[in-house]
């Protein structure tokens, strides 16, 4: 199975029907999209998306009309590991309302420095191009969803 990826203009996903790779443009993530090959409707990823580079991440933050829940974590962090299933549950329930992303601070330390991450895990909600709210420490799924709602209200 193809894992969703970020590039500088969109999220690359595979069509569930024909497996062709499609790019969901950041600026239109809130709009219905169809596969370029088979015309099957495409859905946003129901799992957290791993951030592998700073430039695509920054492009997503600036262009996305959807809120973004970002987990800053590290492999050796016990609370981060405990929270992983909660993030999976939230991503599955988000159903196109928002995206869940994961930034490994050991692999992309620049982003940890840029957002002044002092403890792990740190969760930041980005909305309409800016940081809307943040929380530190492991959180249950309900608290993560409430964090996104607070972030949207703070910006709206």
Image (cartoon, rainbow, N blue to C red):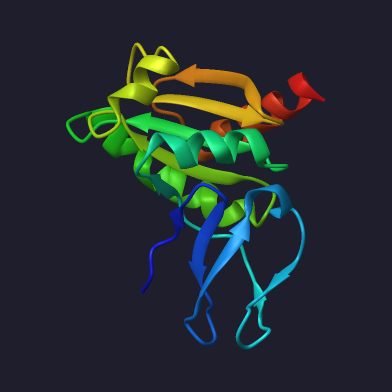
Q: In this view, does 117 lie above or below 5?
A: above
User: Residue 11's x, y, as percent?
Assistant: 53, 56
Note whether residue 16 is visible. yes
Residue closer to the observer: 2 or 6: 6
User: Residue 36's x, y, as percent?
Assistant: 63, 79
| Image quadrant where one finds the C terminus | top right
User: Residue 75's x, y, as percent?
Assistant: 20, 36
Q: Is residue 116 above or below residue 21?
A: above
Note whether residue 140 is visible. no
Quadrant assignment, res 121: top left
User: Residue 105's x, y, as percent?
Assistant: 29, 28
Q: Farthest left residue?
A: 76
Q: Quick check: 144 left or right of 34?
A: left
Which residue is painted at 51% across and 47% down in the image? 8
| Image quadrant where one finds the N terminus | bottom left
Residue closer to the observer: 141 or 75: 75
Q: Farthest right residue?
A: 156
Q: Quick check: 135 left or right of 3?
A: right
Quadrant assignment, res 96: bottom right
Count of residue discs:
0
Quadrant assignment, res 87: top left
Which residue is painted at 59% across and 34% down in the image? 61
Which residue is painted at 47% across and 26% down in the image? 123
Q: Is residue 23 above or below residue 122?
A: below
Q: Quick check: 80 left or right of 134?
A: left
């Amino acid at each position: 199975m193809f894992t969703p990826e970020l590039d500088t203009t969109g999220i690359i996903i595979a069509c569930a029907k024909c497996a062709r790779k499609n790019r969901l443009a950041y600026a239109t993530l809130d709009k219905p999209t169809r596969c370029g090959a088979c015309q099957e409707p495409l859905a946003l990823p129901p799992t957290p998306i791993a951030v592998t580079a700073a430039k695509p991440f920054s492009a997503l933050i600036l262009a996305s009309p959807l809120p973004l829940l970002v987990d800053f974590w590290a492999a050796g962090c016990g609370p981060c590991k405990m929270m992983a299933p909660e993030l999976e549950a939230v991503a599955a329930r988000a159903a196109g309302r928002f995206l869940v992303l994961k930034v490994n601070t050991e692999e992309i330390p620049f982003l940890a420095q840029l957002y002044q991450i002092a403890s792990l895990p740190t969760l930041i909600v980005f909305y309409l191009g800016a940081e809307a709210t943040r929380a530190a420490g492991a959180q249950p799924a309900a608290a993560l969803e409430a964090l996104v709602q607070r972030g949207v209200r703070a910006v709206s």
